[in-house]
Amino acid sequence: MSEWGYILDNTDIFDMHLDEKLKKVVMSTQDCFTQENDYKLVVSFNVNLLSDSRITLVDVPIKKWESNKTTKDKIYNLLNFQLDKICNDLSDCGLNIINSTIQGEHSDVLNEIKIQISEFIPDQILSEKKKKTQKFKIKSVVPNLQFIQDTLSEYSTKRLSEIYIDWMKCIGNNKTIMSEILEIEPTEDDNILAEAFIEQYGDLGFTTKENGEILYNKFKEKAVGILEKRVAESRETEVK
């Protein structure tokens, strides 16, 4: 997958000409992009700017149902406004931005904007039917990326623990069987089992429904196969 990275110095999210500056830098490598392709855009700024006093002065165009009263309102309105302008400018230049994000990150440089553009490749292989439907554009505004990551990590850990416990119950809390399902040496050590489970099925903590079903079916097929094998071996022993 092709990726392009750019850095805009001496500017920040309060710059009302940010889109023009970004467009100029990106278009200097315009020959690298193909109009037939879809692209993903990530715009990153210093998260410390969210506490800048200029936030209180934000007054950008908003929709009728939107508010611009609280600090939170002003932050989201500003970031939405900047991201929309950037996407529109790049679209005018022939880049089909189908997935775009603007996010606040911890950085040592305050007045700097980072841009990353990459070819957009869907997580799932689309069916022929879906390929013929209109593509939906996804836009994300993430004022504080670290906070979101920490929250998701906490949720993911809790969710994985619940799944692990439920699946252990399904196999009668038999650690030998779980070891075999995870294709590791037989062990009674919960830590070893948990680490192997997270390594192989960690995406279950936070994933799409389709990916979740794939991982669930993978585990189910292994578990059923092992249990059926054990039942067959038990019957053979009884016959003898």
Image (cartoon, helix red, strand yellow):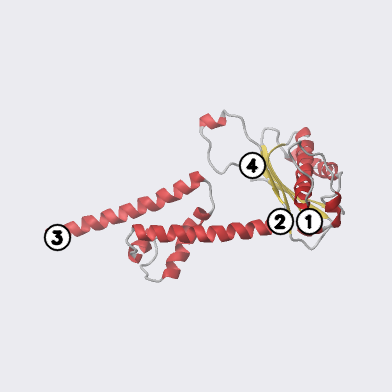
At 45% from the left and 47% from the top, the residue drawn is 214
Please determine whether, in this image, residue 234 is positioned above or below residue 85.
below
Residue highlighted by disc 3: 238
Q: Provide the secondary structure element on which disc 1 rests.
A: helix
**Closer-to-camera residue (106/218):** 106
Name the residue at 38% across, 61% down: 168
Residue assigned mark 2: 144
Q: Is residue 175 above or below residue 79?
A: below
- Per the model, the C-alpha gap separating discs 2 and 4 is 23 Å
| Alpha carbons under labels 4 and 3: distance apart | 58 Å
User: Dot 4 surroundings within 10 Å: few (below 14), some, or many (20 or more)?
Assistant: some
How far apart in space, not on screen, are marks 2 and 3 (Cα)? 63 Å
Image spot of residue 104 (x, y percent): 74, 55
Q: Residues within 10 Å of mark 2 (few under 14, many from 20)?
A: some
Reading the image, the residue beneath label 4 is: 120
Q: Are marks 2 and 1 in contact (CB under 8 Å)?
A: yes
Residue at the spot 87% in from the left edge and 54% down from the top edge: 10
* Mark 4 or mark 1: whose residue is earlier in sequence: 1
Left/right of residue 240 with respect to residue 178 in the rendered view: left
Q: Is residue 233 above or below residue 30?
A: below
Contact (Cβ within 8 Å) of mark 4 with mark 3: no
**Dot 3, crowdedness within 10 Å: few (<14), some or many (≥20)?**
few
* Foreground: disc 1 or disc 3: 1
Query: Badge 1 local density, few (<14 within 10 Å), some, or many (20+)?
Result: some
Per the image, the residue denoted by label 1 is 50
Q: Amino acid at mark 2?
A: Asn
Residue lying furthest bottom in this view?
A: 189
Q: Earlier in the sequence, mark 2 or mark 4?
A: 4
Q: Can residue 9 be seen in this snapshot?
A: no
Q: Residue most toward the front?
A: 69
Earlier in the chain: of badge 2 and badge 3, it is 2
